[in-house]
Amino acid sequence: MTIPLNSSAYRTAPSQSAAPRRITVLGATGSIGENTLDLIGRDPARFQVVALTGGEKVDRLAELAIHHNAELAVIADETRYEALRARLEGTGIEAAAGRQAVIEAATRPADWTMAAIVGVAGLEPTHAAVKQGATVAVANKECLVCAGPVFMAEVRRHGARLLPVDSEHSAAMQLLSQSEGVEIDKLCLTASGGPFRRYTREEMARVTPEQALKHPNWSMGPKITLDSATLMNKALEMLEAQHLFDLPADRIDAVIHPQSVVHCLVYYRDGSVLAHMSPPDMRTPIAYSLAWPERMAVPMAPLDLPKLATLTFEAPDSDRFPALRLAREALRTGKSAGAVLNAANEVAAAAFFAGEIGFLAITEIVERVLTESADLVGREPTTIEDVIVIDEQARRRARECLPAFA
Ligand SMILES: NC(=O)C1=CN([C@@H]2O[C@H](COP(=O)(O)OP(=O)(O)OC[C@H]3O[C@@H](n4cnc5c(N)ncnc54)[C@H](OP(=O)(O)O)[C@@H]3O)[C@@H](O)[C@H]2O)C=CC1
Ligand SMILES: CC(=O)[C@@H](O)[C@H](O)COP(=O)(O)O
Ligand SMILES: [Mn+2]
């Protein structure tokens, strides 16, 4: 379902059942996957693990599957099937491999699926989970960025329930549940500003992948950590919010908040602003989605405001960080702007990690591909398959751009 602004949907208690909830984690070996399983492992009587999937980390996937007594473990990289099968031999856990097997894992009946594969690679498996009509906790923001209206239509068509996991969107869902029947003026996402918040463009031109991977507040996978450094993460998140909450482009904003304690703010026309706070640890939004509409305990210390002492906010600088300007344009353009922006960013991010381009070239390539791809940007996909075709074409154009930025 669309997260409705004017609905009591959040307050409807689920039927209470003594049976453990059947859980699947797509992207189990990643940062979100590990945090999800950490919480699940603390209350094993409440959860039963159906399927776990990984990309390449076959040993870790097998360890997690054994530890959580999963029914099925799937590794996306087919060449690692034999290694997975050997590790799981005698455990009774099924092993499978390949892209299609990941999609099939997502179709196994489950009450709750965590969608935490990174990148557009997560789109088809998450869509497969949505088609089961169950609850999907969606960390994979690319589903919404690339396929927004099509994906949300599929959610409605299959009667699935989406629970946002991205910290800002989890916060937004909690804030918007206070706004039933009330028009909001603005939804404002916070951005830490990343490790280069105070860098000049000249300094940014020389930064290395190692420096970009040092996020000031959050421990996350490499791709999203780099996106935080370019502010492309916030660009993706503005598009994610547009589709999740069905908001007009001009009601979505972002502000720099270096402490990452406030995650989202909702502005009302009477001057009120509601803000959501929590420590910068993803186990809080994951726990919210796992226990929803109830609350569960997490193992972290509560926020210590006197110790924090100061929370600060700054306006983003679009000259040094063009990503937010690109996001605003993409929000207004709609259609396939999000898919093209994301595809170009995935290609450019991989090229930066490979040492092929500099840090500033990442957003420059995204802008170049968006500017030169009016034909792609203007397409209105009607199916997930259409989105994948657009993504592949935008990737090809981004790859063609790389030599000019090397
Ligand atoms: N990390 C965080 O705190 C947050 C993450 N998110 C979003 O959640 C998603 C996951 O992020 P994060 O956990 O950081 O990412 P990670 O890189 O840590 O983990 C990604 C997961 O996806 C798997 N994977 C990678 N490529 C493929 C593929 N082609 N097919 C199948 N599986 C694949 C990886 O497997 P393996 O490692 O075995 O190769 C791993 O399990 C992203 O969309 C991100 O934007 C949103 C908010 C916060
Ligand atoms: C934890 C989470 O939700 C990330 O998306 C986080 O927001 C990244 O930090 P930035 O605010 O630096 O993008
Ligand atoms: Mn986020």
Image (cartoon, rainbow, N blue to C red):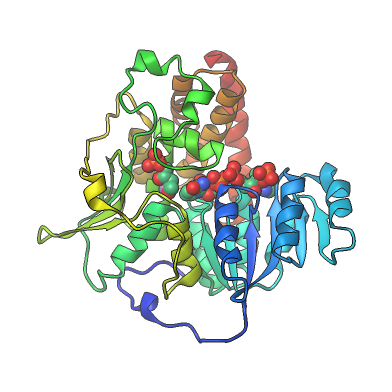
Q: Is residue 275 left or right of residue 61?
A: left
Q: In the image as oriented, which residue stretches furthest toward the left?
A: 270
Q: Is residue 45 left or right of residue 141?
A: right
Q: Is residue 218 above or below residue 176?
A: above
Residue 374 is situated, as x and y percent measured from the top left of the image, at 47, 34
User: Can residue 172 be seen here?
Assistant: yes
Res 70 → quadrant: bottom right
Q: Nearer the viewer, residue 307 or 334?
A: 307
Q: Residue at x 55, y 41 (%)?
A: 221
Residue 211 is situated, as x and y percent measured from the top left of the image, at 48, 24
Q: Nearer the viewer, residue 136 or 372?
A: 136
Res 67 → quadrant: bottom right
Q: Residue at x 44, y 65 (%)?
A: 288
Residue 311 is situated, as x and y percent measured from the top left of the image, at 22, 44
Q: Is residue 385 left or right of residue 376?
A: right
The quarter of the rendered structure image containing the C terminus is top right
Q: Residue at x 60, y 33 (%)?
A: 395
Residue 319 is situated, as x and y percent measured from the top left of the image, at 30, 24
User: Can residue 235 be seen here?
Assistant: no
Q: Nearer the viewer, residue 401 or 139?
A: 139
Q: Residue at x 46, y 60 (%)?
A: 299
